């Protein structure tokens, strides 16, 4: 089986909104619903799990009924950081499913993830045990010590920009989190960085510039523009 865990535990402080950014409505639909629909509509995804902020569980359930997200099987409370939220999600899946299953961990605030990206992540995760969605680094990369002036440059061809989903064999990601706790690693930025911190190699799967993460108000405007331009059809 293939499972999607959608991480919706953030509070969205950088956007300065009155609700968490994953629950903001864009074109009369909450951001998280776009994300859920991407996995709901993918034929290879069997279940969806939402990891969310305490107090928003009933909202998620209402969305699933209204928008017919029939694959939603579990709602899990988030932790005090991203690593803890992901750990809560994968531990919940471990109670119900085989360790050989594949789990895709995805940001709720990446609503434009395409079926092609999901498919490639599944293929690579099944082949290698892990798969990190990435895109090339197209910009010139400068190094700095103080954030004000440069001290050198870095070869962009040696860099990848990571996105989600990030896919794993369920037993592998659960074991990774257990070993991380034993070593006192509790606040890694993402699953891929946790893998690196634990001395593991990661494999890449295909990403896209359209697979944007809604972090700022500018990102919301880009998202609206993509929707207005009729770019939803590429998700089907």
Image (cartoon, helix red, strand yellow):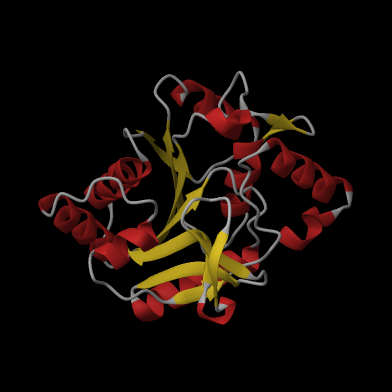
In the rendered view, tell whether residue 92 sits above or below residue 134: above
Farthest residue toward the right?
Answer: 229
Give the quarter of the image for residue 31: top right
In the rendered view, tell whether residue 83 sits above or below residue 156: above
**Where residue 216 sits: x, y (%)?**
65, 39
Q: Is residue 173 left or right of residue 65?
A: left
- Any part of residue 156 in sight: yes
In the rendered view, tell whether residue 153 sits above or below residue 62: below
**Where residue 175 sits: x, y (%)?**
19, 60
Residue visible at 53% across and 23% down in the picture: 59
The number of numbered badges drawn on the structure is: 0
Residue visible at 54% across and 28% down in the picture: 13
Nearer to me, 46 or 188: 188
Q: Is residue 128 left or right of residue 140?
A: left
Give the quarter of the image for residue 16: top right
Nearer to me, 201 or 43: 201
- Any part of residue 65 in sight: no
Farthest residue toward the left?
Answer: 182
In the rendered view, tell whether residue 217 sits above or below residue 160: above
Q: Is residue 209 left or right of residue 104?
A: right
Nearer to me, 24 or 180: 180
Nearer to me, 19 or 50: 19
Q: Is residue 56 left or right of residue 99?
A: right
Residue visible at 63% across and 54% down in the picture: 41
Residue visible at 73% across and 41% down in the picture: 218
**Where residue 57 sits: x, y (%)?**
44, 25
């Amino acid at each position: 089986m293939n499972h999607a865990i959608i991480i919706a535990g953030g509070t969205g402080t950088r956007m300065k909104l009155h609700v968490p950014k994953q629950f903001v409505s864009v074109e009369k639909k909450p951001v998280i619903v776009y994300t859920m629909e991407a996995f709901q509509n993918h034929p290879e995804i069997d279940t969806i799990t939402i990891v969310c902020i305490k107090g928003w569980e009933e909202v998620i359930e209402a969305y699933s009924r209204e928008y017919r997200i029939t694959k939603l099987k579990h709602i899990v409370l988030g932790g005090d950081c991203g690593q803890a939220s992901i750990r809560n999600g994968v531990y919940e899946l471990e109670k119900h499913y085989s360790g050989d299953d594949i789990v895709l961990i995805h940001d709720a605030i990446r609503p434009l993830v395409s079926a092609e990206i999901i498919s490639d992540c599944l293929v690579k995760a099944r082949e290698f045990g892990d798969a990190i969605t990435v895109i090339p680094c197209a910009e010139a990369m400068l190094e700095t010590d103080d954030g004000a002036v440069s001290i050198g440059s870095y070869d962009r061809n040696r860099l990848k920009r990571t996105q989600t989903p990030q896919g794993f064999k369920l037993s592998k990601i659960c074991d990774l989190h257990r070993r991380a706790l034993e070593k006192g690693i509790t606040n890694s930025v993402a699953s891929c960085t946790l893998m690196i911190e634990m001395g593991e190699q990661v494999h890449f799967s295909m990403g896209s510039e359209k697979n944007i993460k809604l972090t700022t108000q500018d990102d919301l405007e880009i998202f609206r523009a993509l929707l207005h331009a009729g770019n939803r059809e590429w998700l089907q």
